[in-house]
Image (cartoon, helix red, strand yellow):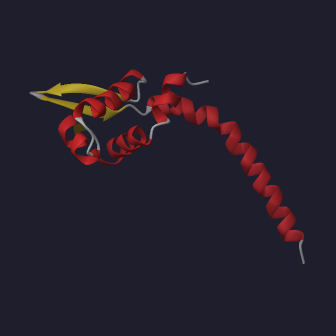
Amino acid sequence: MPDTAVFAALANPVRREVLQVLRDEGPQPVAALAARFGLARPTFSEHLRVLRDAGLASETRQGRQRVYRLEPARLATVRDWLAPFERFWADRLAGLGTVLDELP
């Protein structure tokens, strides 16, 4: 089971959106990320710290900039934990499909 830090990080919509930006657009400087969210810098920095501490993002320095990058390996543990639930729903939906197919 993934540790609670990963779930806690993913529980916040701002942090999920940060991860989506990093996934879709690649590594981003903090200033560019922060500009998207309209949050006070300390508040946004706290979101980045939570993502970093959970292992979902990493930070590197490029000159004077701090650049954040998605660390997708930690998401694999969530996927693995969710897999049995996906199978549960797939089985249920298949059963529903069978019932619907038998209706006149």
Residue lying furthest bottom in this view? 104
Residue lying furthest front in this view? 40
State which quadrant residue 14 falls in.
top left
x, y percentage for residue 52? 36, 25
Q: Nearer the viewer, residue 80 or 7?
A: 7
The quadrant in which the N terminus is found is top right
Which residue is depicted at the point 35% across and 41% down?
Answer: 18
The quadrant in which the C terminus is found is bottom right
x, y percentage for residue 23? 36, 43
State which quadrant residue 63 falls in.
top left
State which quadrant residue 32 falls in.
top left
Residue lying furthest left in this view? 63
Q: Nearer the viewer, residue 24 or 52?
A: 52
x, y percentage for residue 6? 49, 27
Report the number of numbered marks.
Answer: 0
91 sits to left or right of 82: right
Which residue is depicted at the point 68% across and 44% down?
Answer: 86
Which residue is depicted at the point 60% across and 33% down?
Answer: 80
x, y percentage for residue 70? 35, 35
Which residue is depicted at the point 33% across and 41% down?
Answer: 22
